[in-house]
Image (tube, helix red, strand yellow):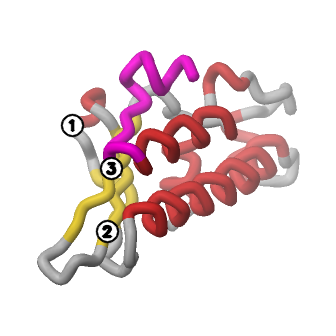
C-alpha cells in the first residue's frame, strides 16, 4: 500500500466500503473501496487467501490499525512533505475528519457479521 492510499483511506472516513468475498475454492478475499462519492474506486484488493471470513476481517483490522498509526505520524510530522502540505500549522488531528480506532471496531464487527461494511452508512459512521 502506498502512502497516498493510506492517507486516502485515513482522511475519507465517511466514504469507504469494505467487503469480504469468497471464491470457488472456499477461500476469502478482501476489498477496500472508496464509497459512492468516488464510484467505489478500488483502493486495496487481495486474492482469495484467507481461510475464513474472520481471518479476512482480522486482516482488514490489522491493516487499518497500522494505517491509522502511520497516517497520524505522517500528518503530524513537521519534517514530512505530506505533513507540511496537509498540516502546515502542526495542528492536532480532528478525529471527526479521519478514520478512528472506534470506526475500525465497527467496520470489523460488521464484516464479521455480514462480510460488508460501509462508512457512508450512518450506523457505522456514528459508532
Residue tagged by mark 3?
Answer: 115
Please tell me how crowded label 3 is: few (under 14), some (14-19), or many (20+) other residues with Cα within 10 Å: many
Q: Does the stretch in magenta take in 6?
A: no
- Secondary structure beneath label 1: loop
Q: Nearer the viewer, residue 15 or 21?
A: 21
Are circles 3 and 2 on residues that touch, CB within 8 Å? no
Please tell me how crowded label 1 is: few (under 14), some (14-19), or many (20+) other residues with Cα within 10 Å: few
Q: Nearer the viewer, residue 71 or 64?
A: 64
Relative to 121, residue 107 above or below: below
Whether residue 22 sits left or right of residue 113 in the image: it is: left
The x, y position of residue 97, in whole percent, is: 62, 24
Mark nearer the N terminus (1 vs 2): 2
Q: Residue at 42% across / 16% down in the picture?
A: 122
Relative to 69, residue 28 above or below: below
Residue tagged by mark 1?
Answer: 39
Q: Which of the two marks, 1 or 2, is nearer to us in this view?
A: 2
The C terminus lies in quadrant: top right
The x, y position of residue 28, in whole percent, is: 30, 70
Q: Nearer the viewer, residue 117 or 46?
A: 117
Q: Which of the two marks, 1 or 3, is nearer to us in this view?
A: 3
Q: Quote the CA–CA distance across marks 3 and 2.
A: 10 Å
Mark nearer the N terminus (3 vs 2): 2
Q: Quote the CA–CA distance across marks 1 and 2.
A: 20 Å
Q: Residue at 28% across / 77% down in the picture?
A: 27
Q: Quote the CA–CA distance across marks 1 and 3.
A: 20 Å
* Residue stretch in magenta: 113-127
Residue tagged by mark 2?
Answer: 29
Q: Residue at 66% across / 33% down in the picture?
A: 102
- Secondary structure beneath label 2: strand
Amino acid at each position: 500500500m502506498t502512502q497516498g492510499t493510506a492517507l486516502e483511506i485515513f482522511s475519507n472516513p465517511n466514504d469507504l466500503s469494505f467487503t469480504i468475498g469468497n471464491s470457488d475454492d472456499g477461500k476469502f478475499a478482501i476489498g477496500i473501496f472508496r464509497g459512492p462519492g468516488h464510484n467505489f474506486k478500488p483502493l486495496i484488493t487481495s486474492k482469495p487467501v484467507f481461510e475464513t471470513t474472520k481471518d479476512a476481517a482480522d486482516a482488514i483490522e490489522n491493516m487499518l490499525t497500522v494505517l491509522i498509526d502511520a497516517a497520524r505520524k505522517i500528518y503530524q510530522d513537521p519534517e514530512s512533505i505530506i505533513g507540511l502540505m496537509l498540516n502546515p500549522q502542526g495542528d492536532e488531528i480532528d478525529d471527526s475528519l479521519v478514520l478512528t480506532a472506534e470506526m475500525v471496531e465497527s467496520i470489523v464487527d460488521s464484516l464479521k457479521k455480514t462480510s460488508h461494511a460501509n462508512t457512508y452508512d450512518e450506523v457505522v459512521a456514528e459508532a
